[in-house]
Image (tube, rainbow, N blue to C red):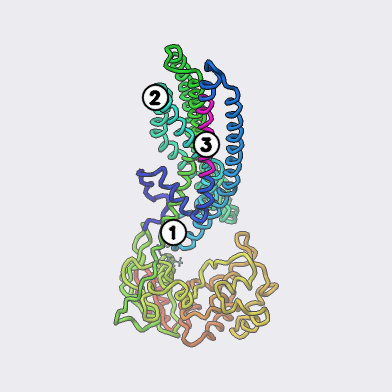
Amino acid sequence: MQYNLNKQPASPRKNATWGPVGKLLTLMTHERPRLIAAFVMMMVNSGLNLLGPLLSAHVIDKYIISQHPDFNSVLRYGIIFLAMYFTALFTGYAQTRLMAGFGQRLLFTLRNSIFGKLQELPVAFFNQNKAGDLISRVNNDTDKINQFFSQSLMQFLSSIFIMTGAAIFMICLNWRLGLATLAPGAFLYLFTKVTSAWVKTQNARSMKSTGGLSAEIQESLQNFKVIIAFNRRDYFREKFQEANAENYENAVRAGIANNIYTPVYGMCAGLGQLVVLLYGIHMIQTGVFQIGQLVAFLAYATYFYNPLRQLAALWAAFQVALAGWDRISAILHLENNLLVEPASGKNHAPTALMSFRNVYFHYPDGKEVLHDINFDLERGKTYAFIGPTGGGKTTTASLVARLYDPTRGSVWLDGRDIKTYDAADRTGKIGFILQEPILFSGTVRENILYGNPAYSMLSPEQLQEALREEGLSDLLDRFDTGLDTPVSTGGETMSLGQRQLIAFMRAVLRHPDLLILDEATANIDTVTEQLLEGILRKLPETTTRVIIAHRLNTIESADEIFFVNSGEVTRAGSFGDAVEMLMSGKRVS
Ligand SMILES: Nc1ncnc2c1ncn2[C@@H]1O[C@H](COP(=O)(O)OP(=O)(O)OP(=O)(O)O)[C@@H](O)[C@H]1O
């Protein structure tokens, strides 16, 4: 599956306008009664507005300018007009009340859906997309949709309804004059059809560059220490200015595109009304038409062209919302390619805790990192994976934890293909301590209890006791206020070693069958490292440990050493052989 959002194919042109609206509304099915009620109110309101000119024409022609004016009937109709006016007032108010907050609720639902989807997606997705661009999609693009739905949707529908009604009334009143009045409208229809895709594209470009700008900001904020340390401020300032300039140019182009409708629609509206006046007066002169009818016709021409002027702005807002939806649905359409598969019931499942069988792997668009790899990790043993930088150690560990699936071959966990485990079972069996530990804002306690329901129930005293039993309480001395020490992400207030200790406690407390330490002791002093080794030795006898390390002293106690390099994972034999391999950077024969 293509996870790079900027390489996704463009949305199919067929039904590219109304299809997305339908899909968006399916997100809001729980609001259907409210939407239907608002729609009915809008129809009644527009219907009453449309009926007005017809009744006026009737009253003028029949009771006012006839040979026998009937002012009692005019009064009766006046009361009917008043009732219609109040009903229109009520339905307009009810429609506004019903739609109040709809856009905000849609925004809420959309953001929840996208965030839910982001949480489902595999690591490969996050490797290929910049966080800043994703944030821009969740915040900025959803808001574009909200703006259209909260401010314009009902106005948009009501404009279309009134225009259609006005067109029908005009054709029924006099089809020749009706068609002549609508002719500029037909031109507008064609103009809109031809230009809409271009307007949408300009808006999509503008949003893409806003995403790029956001990614640029995110990258420099994240790496501010390196930027300052290497004095690369100018370089990043230049990069930012480039992204900002591109964003500015695209925003200006989108603004121009969004404004093309207003003057063209305005000109056609003027033309339509001119046609009614000239042709209508000519028809009165020739006796084909009456004054009341012309008054009604002029009113309907106004009903047709005034909403059309509004539609110019609304249509542009609609194209902006559609462009935003394209960028959002590109995320919503993605599926996790690491699905849980049904157990295959293979007879010759390996008996080791973890086995690689003929595993090949390459990253999307990358070269092959693992080539036909086979190894077994037995229960209770300690394994070391060593090898040069970029040799493939972390990649091997990532396949062990099913952060990726092999391109070919299979990975077995406890007698079952790892693909048959659901996420909770798999992560319960495998603990992972990364080079760069991932912590969340909160306290040390919250971080070590993350994803551990069994210990989350314990009182602070019980937790202290549990940590003491696990031999972890000495590690807490490395923190000023123990379990209550605050942890912040972003503006780091802790050393990398301290963060690795928290990740270590978190992994050990989950009692995994397989514990992977990926360079987990690289930033820890020797005394603390010995403390960790003691804790590792105290783990249950059945726990398998996988240590990925550059420092040779950390692998001395390993039962078996694997050398990972150039797509191969080779048994290193003795510690001495491993050292030799590492020094020469290749396999010894
Ligand atoms: N997300 C990724 N996308 C594309 N290629 C990647 C990705 N991660 C790693 N690689 C490539 O895969 C190869 C193996 O990388 P890996 O991180 O597994 O090496 P390593 O042995 O763990 O290195 P180190 O000791 O520096 O941590 C390298 O060539 C690297 O460039």
Kindly identify which residue carries mark 1: 125
Q: Secondary structure at mark 2?
A: helix
Quick one: quadrant of the N terminus?
Answer: bottom left
Q: Any atom of ligand 1 within 8 Å of the CB at mark 2?
A: no
Residue 587 is situated, as x and y percent measured from the top left of the image, at 35, 73
Residue 277 is situated, as x and y percent measured from the top left of the image, at 48, 17
Residue 347 is situated, as x and y percent measured from the top left of the image, at 29, 82
Quick one: quadrant of the C terminus?
Answer: bottom left
Q: Secondary structure at mark 1?
A: helix
Kindly identify which residue carries mark 3: 46
Q: Quadrant of ligand 1?
A: bottom left
Q: Are marks 3 and 2 in contact (CB under 8 Å)?
A: no
Find the magenta span and give its range. Answer: 40-57
Instruction: Name the dominant secondary structure of the magenta segment.
Output: helix
Q: Residue furthest left?
A: 347
Q: Residue furthest top?
A: 285
Q: Secondary structure at mark 3?
A: helix
Q: 46 or 418: which is nearer to us? A: 46
Kindly identify which residue carries mark 2: 175
